[in-house]
């Protein structure tokens, strides 16, 4: 029985496609920036905006990333921090059905912000924008609103154009 489950899981994992995430915003300082993860401890990686683009696996309703060959981290939002975590099987997400689309969390693309000086564990946000989520509350002053656009990593569309 366990072997059969492993075969099914392996088959499903092969159906995942590589997705890159990008900020789309009316604020020129963050519009078009890539979204990538940085290790922040205990199986958790917070998300930051910058020039780098990271490949994540999209399986139709969740995002994940491999950490070595031992385990996966899944996209989730804890408190106000979008993150990849090993302790959670992930948030239900959705992209608009097209070659590129907007990420929806809690049935909405809104609520994501780029913020600095968030108090993150290694102070990455001192010099970089950290991705934050404030759906039902006002974000701190200085945070910039955005939506997250997903693009297949083999897309020929240039990043930041044509979305």
Image (cartoon, helix red, strand yellow):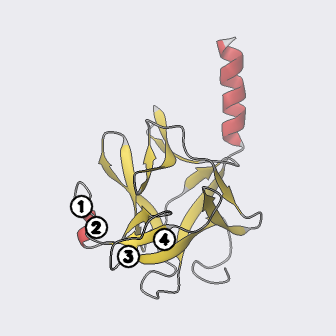
| Label 4 secondary element | strand
Which one is in front, 84 or 26? 26
**Residues at discs 1 and 2 in contact (Cβ within 8 Å):** yes
Q: Which mark is residue 125?
A: 2
**Quadrant assignment, res 116:** bottom left
Between marks 4 and 3, how big is the CA–CA gap? Answer: 17 Å
| Label 1 secondary element | loop
Residue 116 appears in the figure: yes
**Residues at discs 4 and 2 in contact (Cβ within 8 Å):** no
The relative height of residue 70 versus residue 55 in the rendered view (above or below) is above
Q: Residues within 10 Å of mark 2 (few under 14, many from 20)?
A: some
Q: Which mark is first along the chain, 2 or 4? A: 4
**Residue ID for mark 4:** 34
Q: Residues within 10 Å of mark 3 (few under 14, many from 20)?
A: some
Q: Residue at x 41, y 63 (%)?
A: 132
**Residue ID for mark 1:** 119
**Quadrant assignment, res 150:** bottom right
Between marks 1 and 4, how big is the CA–CA gap? Answer: 21 Å
Q: Which mark is first along the chain, 1 or 3? A: 1
- What percent of the width, then of the height, locates residue 44? 37, 45
| Label 2 secondary element | helix
Between marks 3 and 1, how big is the CA–CA gap? Answer: 14 Å
Between marks 1 and 2, how big is the CA–CA gap? Answer: 7 Å
Q: Which quadrant would the C terminus be assigned to in this image? A: bottom right
Q: Which mark is first along the chain, 4 or 1? A: 4
Residue 153 appears in the figure: no
Q: Which mark is first along the chain, 3 or 4? A: 4
- What percent of the width, then of the height, locates residue 123? 22, 62
């Amino acid at each position: 029985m366990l072997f059969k489950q492993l075969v099914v899981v392996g088959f499903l994992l092969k159906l995942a496609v590589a997705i890159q995430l990008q900020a789309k915003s009316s604020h020129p300082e963050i519009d078009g920036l890539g979204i990538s993860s940085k290790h922040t401890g205990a199986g958790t990686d917070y998300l930051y905006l910058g020039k780098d683009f990271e490949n994540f696996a999209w399986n139709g309703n969740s995002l994940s990333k491999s950490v070595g060959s031992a385990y996966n981290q899944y996209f989730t939002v804890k408190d106000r921090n979008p993150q990849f975590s090993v302790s959670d099987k992930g948030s239900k997400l959705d992209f608009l059905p097209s070659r590129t689309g907007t990420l929806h969390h809690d049935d909405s693309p809104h609520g994501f912000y780029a913020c600095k000086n968030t108090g993150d564990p290694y102070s990455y946000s001192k010099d970089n924008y950290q991705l934050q989520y404030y759906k039902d509350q006002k974000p701190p002053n200085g945070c910039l609103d955005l939506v997250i656009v997903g693009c297949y990593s083999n897309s020929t569309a240039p990043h930041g154009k044509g979305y």
